[in-house]
């Protein structure tokens, strides 16, 4: 049986027409191509898809492959592929942190500020205590404990130096 | 919902929904990218690129899927094959195996180059597609019928009508030129 494409005259005629026509048809989006593959488009909707396919006949392979894949879906993949693809989306814990409400952030900053204030006050108090504890032995060492603790003794010392 | 996968939850960043989606469709995507992939291509990289595209920019591509228009498997296959071809275009210069080029492309003819723009609407899109598959891809009637999910007789009659139109068009054109 003679195939349609065997006629050299027809082929030449087609080539002559094909080379003389405009070759710009907008590419249909993936969703439209998928719908076309499943035969869900009306004749009117399918027309621009077929006009584009006529200019890009290799793209028909995608349509055919998509249709076949639906009929015989493969289910086997390497474990490494699944692991890598799964890792593209982080765990929900991370997402929850990202989506934390503003009041939670405010609360966190308040806590930090309060901690700093407590630490500052504590440090100040501890500094005072340390000064007192350092000053006392020094006075004891100099033997001036009484004069430091009792102003009257200090007055008497002044009086003594004044006389 | 598509194939018991909650796409709405998936697009909100639900990890469990994403993992289920990956387990369910990794095999399909691997099989889809294998078609356009050249020998020696890292298929795993291609699959990873497909999944990356699906979740990139807050799942923009995945959100464009419309379950009322086509099945998820069909849509994913076209996305995967398109991604695979894009990757190959980026990585290697375009090379066409000589065996896949129709002989007509090499033919040297003495035919005059067409100066006039020919009317696109002369053939219907379906006629253009069928004739292009016959003469540009050298497909036979059975292959075309299977690819377009139509009857082989429809392919023959569509081709016949298309060629009649072309013959009439060029006959009228030549008559006008001579006259």
Image: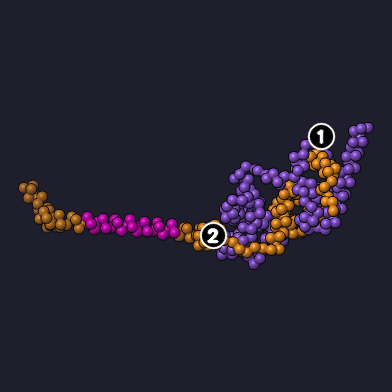
Q: Secondary structure at mark 2?
A: helix
- Mark 2–mark 1 distance (CA, rounded to whole Å): 57 Å
Please give the count of numbered marks on the rendered protein. Answer: 2
Q: What's the magenta region?
A: A108-131
Residue B147 x %, y %: 76, 56
Q: Tell me the residue at 41%/59% (across/down).
A: A111
Q: Colour of chain B?
A: purple
Q: Is residue B48 visible?
A: no
Provide the chain ID for the residue under circle 1.
Answer: B
Q: Colour of chain A?
A: orange
* Quarter holding residue B152: bottom right
| Few, some or many residues within 10 Å of mark 1 (<14, 14–19, 20+) | few
From the image, give the main secondary structure of the stretch colored magenta. Answer: helix
Q: Secondary structure at mark 1?
A: loop
Of the residues tagged 2 and 1, which is closer to the observer? Answer: 1
* Quarter holding residue B179: top right
Q: Is residue A129 magenta?
A: yes
Q: Which residue is mark 2?
A: A80
Residue A46 x %, y %: 78, 53
Q: Is residue B97 visible?
A: yes
- Nearer to the camera, A147 or B41: B41
Q: Which residue is mark 1?
A: B110
- Nearer to the camera, B94 or A93: B94
* Quarter holding residue B70: bottom right
Q: Tell me the residue at 47%/58% (across/down).
A: A105
């Amino acid at each position: 049986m003679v195939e349609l494409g065997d006629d050299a005259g027809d082929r030449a005629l087609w080539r002559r027409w094909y080379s003389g026509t405009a070759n710009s048809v907008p590419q249909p989006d993936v969703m439209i191509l998928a719908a076309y593959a499943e035969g869900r488009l009306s004749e009117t909707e399918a027309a621009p898809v077929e006009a584009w396919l006529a200019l890009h006949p290799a793209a028909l392979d995608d349509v055919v492959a998509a249709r076949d894949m639906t009929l015989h879906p493969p289910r086997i993949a390497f474990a490494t592929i699944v692991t890598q693809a799964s890792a593209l989306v982080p765990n929900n814990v991370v997402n929850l942190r990202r989506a934390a409400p503003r009041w939670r952030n405010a609360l966190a900053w308040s806590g930090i500020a309060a901690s700093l204030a407590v630490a500052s006050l504590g440090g100040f108090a501890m500094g005072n205590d340390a000064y007192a504890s350092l000053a006392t032995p020094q006075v004891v060492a100099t033997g001036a404990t009484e004069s430091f603790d009792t102003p009257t003794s200090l007055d008497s010392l002044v009086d003594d130096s004044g006389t | 919902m598509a194939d018991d996968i909650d796409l709405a939850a998936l697009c909100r960043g639900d990890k469990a929904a994403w993992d289920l989606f990956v387990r369910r469709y990794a095999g399909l995507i691997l099989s889809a990218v294998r078609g356009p992939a050249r020998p020696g291509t890292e298929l795993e990289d291609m699959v990873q690129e497909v999944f990356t595209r699906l979740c990139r920019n807050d799942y923009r591509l995945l959100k464009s899927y419309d379950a009322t228009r086509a099945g998820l498997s069909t849509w994913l296959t076209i996305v995967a094959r398109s991604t695979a071809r894009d990757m190959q275009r980026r990585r290697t210069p375009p090379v066409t195996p000589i065996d896949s080029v129709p002989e007509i492309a090499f033919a040297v003819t003495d035919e005059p180059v067409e100066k006039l723009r020919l009317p696109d609407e002369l053939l219907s899109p379906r006629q253009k597609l069928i004739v292009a598959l016959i003469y540009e891809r050298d497909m036979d009637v059975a292959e075309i019928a299977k690819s377009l999910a139509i009857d082989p007789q429809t392919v023959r009659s569509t081709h016949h009508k298309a060629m009649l139109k072309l013959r009439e068009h060029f006959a009228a054109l030549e008559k006008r030129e001579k006259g």
